[in-house]
Image (cartoon, rainbow, N blue to C red):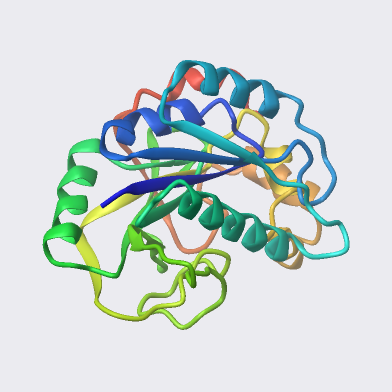
Amino acid sequence: MTLGVIYNLWDCEYLIEKSIQQIYEYVDFVIIGWQKNSNYGEENPKVEETVKDLLNRYEKIRSYKYEPDAKYSGQYNEKTKRNKGLEVALNFGCTHYILMDADEFYQGGRFCQAKYFIMENNIDSSSMGLYSYYKSPILRLEPQEKYDVPFICKLNADTKVGDFEFPAYCDPTRKPYHTGKYHRFDDMVMHHYTFCRRDINQKINNSSAKQNYIAIYGSLNKFVEKFHSEKKPIIGEFSLIETFDIFGLVSNFETNK
């Protein structure tokens, strides 16, 4: 197995290095697909300098720049960017891949065990559940999300991701076109720091799901106002559980506007 992890990066660049560090020794390439402007036109100048710094310090890291097309939706651009990452990984000789965002974390030991299970059992595609975190790395939403995240999958010249048929319900921008042997890891989870941001406005204003927030709350500003004022989660039917800072992330959040 030659495993490439392909990151989709625009915001929360202050998290990506710690995410990479958890799994770095278990992958062959770290490929960062980055963009200076979001899918909705907002600029984040810190992304390019972050990528350059990581390229200088980590031997396994590679990168490619993506230019979003404003004529198309956020989901279209996200899917196109991820598929470009598959092409890059294939060019580096990867036989397997995993798609990630900068706010997604796996515990290294479990990642390694799962990787070798996939190798030993010739698994073609895999997925697992995930926990989301809310406002702080020590505040976890319970229960787990009702959808899965695709995990390590085989890579060949025909591999694509998008809204394809897949054994698990997943993000439509990263579901692989599934053929072959599938496995779901019931004893492992991905940790998603989706609502942990220095600036929640940046996330919400540029989210491919922002129309969902507008439909529920009337406006993005109203969502942000309730996010800061309400003690209970305002996303779905969740409760908040205080937990420990698994990956040492608390210090990464200097502000939370």
Name which residue lies at 75% across and 31% down.
44
Residue 232 placement, left or right of 179: right
Give the quadrant of residue 169: bottom left
Q: Is residue 193 visible?
A: yes
How far across and how far down the image is residue 36, in percent? 75, 36
Decide which of 157, 225 is in the foreground and name it.
Answer: 157
Give the quadrant of residue 41: top right
Above or below for 191 versus 216: above
Above or below for 82 versus 202: below
How far across and how far down the image is residue 61, in percent? 47, 31
Q: Is residue 143 visible?
A: no
Question: In this view, which residue lies farthest toward the right?
Answer: 71
Name which residue lies at 51% across and 79% down.
164
Residue 92 placement, left or right of 118: right
Residue 111 placement, left or right of 197: left
How far across and how far down the image is residue 27, in percent? 32, 40
Name which residue lies at 47% across and 55% down.
90
Give the quadrant of residue 69: bottom right
Q: Which quadrant would the C terminus be assigned to in this image?
A: top right
Residue 16 placement, left or right of 228: left
